[in-house]
Image (cartoon, helix red, strand yellow):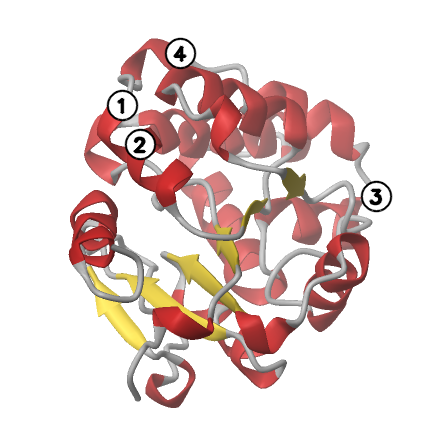
Amino acid sequence: MVFDPSRVDCWIFDLDYTLYPPACGLFGQIDRRMGLFIANLLSCDAQEARRVQKMYFHDHGTTLAGLMHYHAIDPREFLDFVHDVDMSLLAQAPRLADRLQALPGRRLIFTNGDKPYADKVLAALGLTDCFEGMWDVIAMDYRPKPEPSAYHGLIEAFGFDPERAVFVEDSARNLAPAKALGMQTVWIDCASDWGDRAKDDAAIDLVIDDLPQWLDTLAAGPALG
């Protein structure tokens, strides 16, 4: 499969590990706070909390979805707790901002996080003005990617043609539903522990490992230049 930017007038981006790299350590903070939340909830040690955390993530799309399914927790309490992290680990990304703003057409965020957290991430990166809108886990009614309803809701909310859209995401399993709806797909292989889980090569049009570099290439090409 070959990615064709000339067919795209809607650019959809995941947030974590897509707009910033794993090396900054931000999501590591969130990961640890998820474990602490579970340890407190279940009165268990850190090892058991991590086992439960990852089981829920792999089986339900997000740790939150698993906690809601099995323990009926208040999702806002969980989100506020795990997202209480140090945003100073993120650096302003002016090159990325320039490249995003140069993309022709609409630009959207599609994240399994919540909007208050995503807004803080975008502000820390200097990307607040780069996106028209956002579809977050709350808008998804807490049924996160890769649930098909999340993708249908995104399309309905923003009224775009999926065959004229591309979805850029670091979690390979989240690309298959987008591909099934006609979107082009770009997988950011950032060598995370779970990024290639349930990867379907037939659902991926392009693999990259550096978002700004890829956008530089697009900007220099005939379709966008």
**Amino acid type indicated by mark 3:** Ala
Specify whether residue 27 is in view.
Answer: yes
In the image, 33 versus 139, the foreground residue is 139
Task: Decide which of tag 2 and tag 4 comes sooner along the chain.
Answer: 4
- Which residue has dot 3 on it? 72
**How far is disc 1 from disc 3 in space, using C-alphas?**
41 Å
Check whether the beta carbons of the residues at disc 1 and disc 3 lie within 8 A of each other. no
User: Neighbour class for label 2 at 10 Å: few (<14), some, many (≥20)?
Assistant: some
- Which residue has dot 2 on it? 98
- For the point 61% across and 60% down, the residue is 145
Viewer-nearest of labels 2 and 4?
2
In the image, residue 34 above or below residue 208: above
Q: Position of residue 2 (x, y in %)?
A: 29, 84
**How far is disc 4 from disc 3 in space, using C-alphas?**
28 Å
- For the point 78% across and 60% down, the residue is 153
In the image, 53 versus 94, the foreground residue is 94
- Which residue has dot 4 on it? 86
Check whether the beta carbons of the residues at disc 4 and disc 1 lie within 8 A of each other. no
- Which residue has dot 1 on it? 94
**How far is disc 2 from disc 4 in space, using C-alphas?**
25 Å
Check whether the beta carbons of the residues at disc 2 and disc 4 lie within 8 A of each other. no
